[in-house]
Image (cartoon, grey):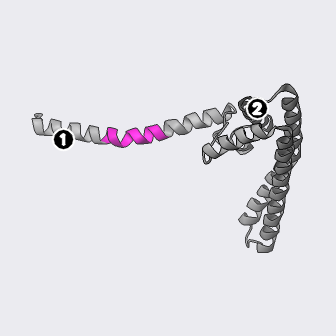
Amino acid sequence: METTPTTTKKRWSRRRYLVLLAAPVLLVVGFLALRARAADAGFGFGPGWGHGGSPEQHKAFMMRRLDRMLDMVKADDSQRTAIKAIAERTFAETQSLHEQHGRIHDQIATALAADPVDRASVENLRTQLVKMMDQGSQAVSKGLLDAAQILTPAQRQTLAQFLREHHGRRRPF
């Protein structure tokens, strides 16, 4: 068979079309592979421990963010020590809640897979989750208020201004 300019052009158009279709797919697959590898290495792409990090890695990440915040407000050594102690206490309080959350989450998954689904059981588990979220929120709020008392009014203003300017950003620190 003889190659004419028209058949060569059609073949090139098909190749170009396939490359244009494959490129986005390869980019997405590559991104997901990198994301999975980063999560395995403890560099999760989101908050919480469910994104590839252990509780220890999450704690280390949050302590680094706390250090940056304390640097930003120019906290002295005594303030740093006191606020880090509050952070440690708060982390310990919320860690047990996180573990309970994981158990209830598994129970919800099991209940939803049952045939028939027991609505009362799922509702009971949901209310337990809401109660735990409220307990966690209270612990974090108490920690924030305790830390706020250690900072000076000027330091709190600096922090508040930074938070206002960066509202909605994923990782402000």
Give the SS element for disc 1: helix
Please state if 27 lies on the left or on the right of 118 as rendered.
left
> Where on the picture, by quarter, is residue 48?
top right
Please state if 95 lies on the left or on the right of 1 as rendered.
right
Q: Residues within 10 Å of mark 2 (few under 14, many from 20)?
A: many
| Residue lying at 88% horizontally and 28% vertically, measured from the top left | 78
- The kind of residue tagged 2 is Leu
Q: Is residue 60 above or below residue 21?
A: above
Is residue 114 visible in the rendered image? The answer is yes
Q: Could you say where residue 99 lies in the image, as x and y percent from the top left?
A: 83, 48
Residue 70 got which mark?
A: 2
| Residue lying at 70% horizontally and 33% vertically, measured from the top left | 42
Of residues 77 and 88, the one nearer the viewer is: 77
User: In this figure, which residue is indicated by the disc labeled 1?
Assistant: 10
- The kind of residue tagged 1 is Lys
> Where on the picture, by quarter, is residue 45?
top right
Q: Could you say where residue 139 lies in the image, as x and y percent from the top left?
A: 86, 50
- First in sequence: mark 2 vs mark 1: 1
| Residue lying at 29% horizontally and 42% vertically, measured from the top left | 17
Residue 116: say if magenta.
Answer: no
Which stretch appears magenta? Answer: 18-28
Mark 2 or mark 1, whichever is nearer to me:
2
Residue 27: say if magenta.
Answer: yes
Q: CA distance from mark 2 to mark 1?
A: 63 Å
